[in-house]
Image (cartoon, coloured by chain):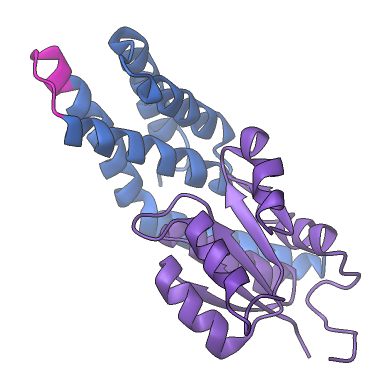
């Protein structure tokens, strides 16, 4: 059974490219959200195996969304990878606030699934080979 | 990676996404040019500045995914210049002209 990833980004291009890459190259099941608020709702309903979360978004930004995800019991255990163009300055701060890791924009669609697995310590792309 | 066939499917899908999003990318470029035109006319509009900064940020984040790494770097440079409290308009103008050439010179089918 494929693992499920939730991609939260207000930029439609990023959502579409990430979804295409993670599904076709990585073999993941992907759900998307276009805002932090919608992402919180979907995370609670879909309980994804991991979340890829954009840092800079209008209204509820990535840091606020991350804090909410970590605050809520239902989503606190879901690893969150932050997606940002400002990685050098932000990496330590983001990890300190509960992020599992950081992905840099722009990402290479062919390498994105491998990068996700590397950050999360997953062996197989997409495939959930652990008993849940 | 899975199969090479899947990589081909991804490339084809990316091409489709780029074709659909190219008008939006060009409108973001236009937002940068509008900001510069306004500055050249002596006006300062904070909203226009914020729009230009947002446009540069989005172009920086998206162009590289479509294989336009030089254009993405150029947009990052523009974002950095626009982030300064008093942007160097001469440098921004140079970079925006360069970005237009890069965007029009690649994958414009």
In the image, what residue occupies the spot 70% across and 50% down?
A96
Number of numbered tags placed on the structure image: 0
**Nearer-the-camera pick, B34 or A119:** A119
Observer able to see residue B15: no
State the quadrant of the N terminus of chain B. bottom right
At x 58%, y 78%, the residue is A72
- Tell which of A110 and B106 is nearer to you: A110
On screen, residue A118 versus residue B33, left or right, reads: right
- The location of residue A25, given as percent across then percent down, is 73, 68
Task: Please check the rendered image and state whether residue B39 is part of the magenta-colored stretch, yes or no.
Answer: yes
User: In the rendered view, would you say A113 is above or below B99?
Assistant: below
Report the magenta residues as a range: B37-45
Apparent side of residue B62 relative to residue A80 in the rendered image (left or right)? left
Residue occupying image coordinates x 40% and y 61%: A60
Does residue A82 lie above or below A124 as drawn? above
- Is residue B105 toward the left or the right of residue A101 in the image? left
Name the spot of residue A28 as percent of width and height, x first.
71, 77
Question: A36 or A122, which lies in front?
Answer: A36
Measuring from the top left, give residue B63's x and y in whole percent. Answer: 49, 42
A61 shown above or below A88: below
Indicate the quadrant where residue B101 lies.
top left
Spot the blue chain and give its letter: B
Residue A80 seen from this side: yes
Displayed quadrant of residue A46: bottom right
Tell me if A25 is positioned left or right of A131 in this view: left
Q: Residue A67 lies in what quarter of the image?
A: bottom right
Q: Colour of chain A?
A: purple
């Amino acid at each position: 059974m494929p693992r499920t990833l939730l991609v939260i980004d207000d930029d439609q291009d990023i959502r579409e490219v990430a979804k295409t890459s993670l599904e076709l190259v990585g073999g993941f099941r992907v759900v998307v959200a276009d805002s932090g608020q919608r992402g919180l709702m979907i995370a609670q309903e879909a309980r994804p195996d991991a979340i890829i979360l954009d840092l800079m978004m209008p209204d509820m930004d990535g840091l606020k969304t991350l804090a909410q995800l970590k605050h809520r019991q239902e989503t606190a255990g879901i690893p969150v990878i932050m997606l940002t163009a400002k990685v050098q300055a932000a990496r330590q701060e983001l990890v300190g606030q509960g992020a599992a890791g950081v992905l840099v924009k722009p990402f290479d669609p062919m390498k994105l699934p491998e990068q996700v697995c590397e950050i999360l310590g997953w062996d197989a792309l997409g495939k959930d080979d652990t008993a849940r | 990676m899975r199969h090479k066939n899947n990589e081909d499917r991804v490339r084809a899908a990316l091409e489709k996404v780029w074709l659909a999003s190219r008008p939006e990318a060009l409108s973001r470029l236009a937002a940068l040019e509008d900001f510069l035109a306004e500055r050249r006319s002596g006006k300062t509009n904070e909203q226009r500045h914020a729009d230009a900064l947002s446009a540069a940020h989005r172009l920086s984040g998206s162009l590289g995914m479509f294989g336009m790494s030089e254009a993405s770097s150029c947009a990052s440079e523009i974002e950095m210049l626009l982030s300064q409290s008093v942007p160097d308009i001469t440098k921004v103008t140079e970079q925006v002209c360069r970005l237009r050439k890069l965007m029009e010179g690649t994958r414009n089918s």
